[in-house]
Amino acid sequence: MPTKKNSKLNAADRVLIYQRIEMKDSMSAMARKVGVSTKTVINEIKRNVVSESPMFLSQKGRNLCKKAGRCTVTSLCEGGCIASCSKCTKVSCNEMCPDYEPEPCPLLEKPPYCCNTCHQRFGYGCVHEYHFYDPHIAEELTRKRRSEARQGIDITPEELAKMNELVTVLVKDQGQSYEHVWATHGDELPVTWRTYYNYTHIGATELIPLDLPKAVRFKPRKKAKGHGDADVRGDMEGRLYSDFKELPDEKRAKAVQMDCVKGKKGERPAILTFTWPSMIFQLPFYIEAEDQEHVQEVFWMLQDLLDDDFDDVFEIVLTDRGSSFLDSSKLELDRDGKKRCSVYYCDALRSDQKGSCEREHAELRRIVRKGTSLLKFEKRDMPLIASHMNSYLKPELNFDSPLSRAIKVLPENLLVGYGIELIPPDEVVMKPKLIEHILQR
């Protein structure tokens, strides 16, 4: 809870609000539990609801327009249909029709102001837009708003022009430092010298950094070879991490992180992993060699398991620039050459950009220790490891297991087809002895 009056809600507070919504607490009870006013809790929920969340099941393909029953519009997709578009099951009027007008849900005017616990959203009972409160997305949205609020400069153009007129002459023509100028004229200037210094570095003033007295005395330190912005390898146009950051928050929250865990040095087998950060859920796959062909085979297998659900589960994949992932076409295209997902690549030497995946690798390494030979492993061994890893209770999930969350969100045919099972908490093994029978083959 906030540590002092008027302080901001944090991630833990948002998780607590979500838990209390699931328990159907009143707004006032939530506020007391979090330690804030009731109005703060209500504003938090209303401000951060989203239409999609990986934490909630939702029914797609619903026509939500209030005019759907009497609509006669045809051929929105220019397919030459005679029937009304409101009856079409292939495209959504909600996205294509310029006259789309949603029907407001009267239940959202009352607590809990979201659809989290509404039973009417299951099946086709709901004809309104979803409003889910997801604490993880709420935290991201809040951080984004704070960041955007701090961008730009906080003075009027007139104040900036007047300040430039005074400072530019003294610094550029007379070689004075900002500190010196502000010591003399501080009462006449609307911002501090440090703020003006920041304005200079974002190009908002008439001065540039090289105009400053001490700027030419320093040069950037040389970076170690291989660090920083490495040359782009493979076809990464439109697939860089900067492009990933431009995606809507809902899509980034659904992104699946992919990586490889190596076996013993000099051996070819590896473990390919997929991680869902919101659930801290990771599925490992044994591959006979860490190369593009074997990674592609796993994608084909997943598509066979998921069928039409593949596009939704693996819509966005975030991975590193390893050689086995560089051919994006082998990952993004199915056997017929149709696009099935979008792959994005982290910056070079920035494993922190897929931190959830790396943290779960540490859990995997508790069972398959670094340097362990994978030569005796088989594909059928991975479900055992995955079952124990994902049955391990996580404090971040309020001491729930990743698999318990995954069962509620991911398609059943993926989990059943993979062979993962929920292990009782007392029977979970997170040590190498779990795989002793494999290594003794």
Image (spheres, rainbow, N blue to C red):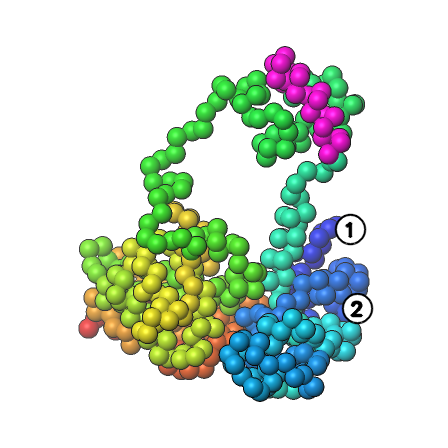
402 sits left or right of 224 in the view: right
Quarter-of-image position of residue 200: top right
Q: Which residue is mark 2?
A: 28
Residue farthest toward the top in the current orientation of the protein: 174
Q: Is residue 66 left or right of residue 369?
A: right
In this image, 433 relative to 340: left or right? Answer: left
Mark count: 2
Residue 347's place in the image compared with 203, above or below, is below
- Could you say which is closer to the camera, residue 351 or residue 164? 164
Q: Which stretch appears magenta?
A: 157-177
Dominant secondary-structure state across the stretch colored magenta? helix
Label drawn at residue 5: 1
Label 1 amino acid? Answer: Lys
Residue 130 vs 46, above or below: the answer is below
Residue shown at 56%/71% (left/top)?
Answer: 55
Residue at disc 2, secondary structure: helix
Using a 10 Å C-alpha cutoff, classify the residue at mark 1 as few (fewer than 14 neighbours), some (14 to 19) or many (20 or more): few
Q: Position of residue 334 (x, y in %)?
A: 34, 72
Can residue 299 be seen here? Answer: no
Q: Position of residue 325 (x, y in %)?
A: 33, 59
Which SS class for mark 1? loop
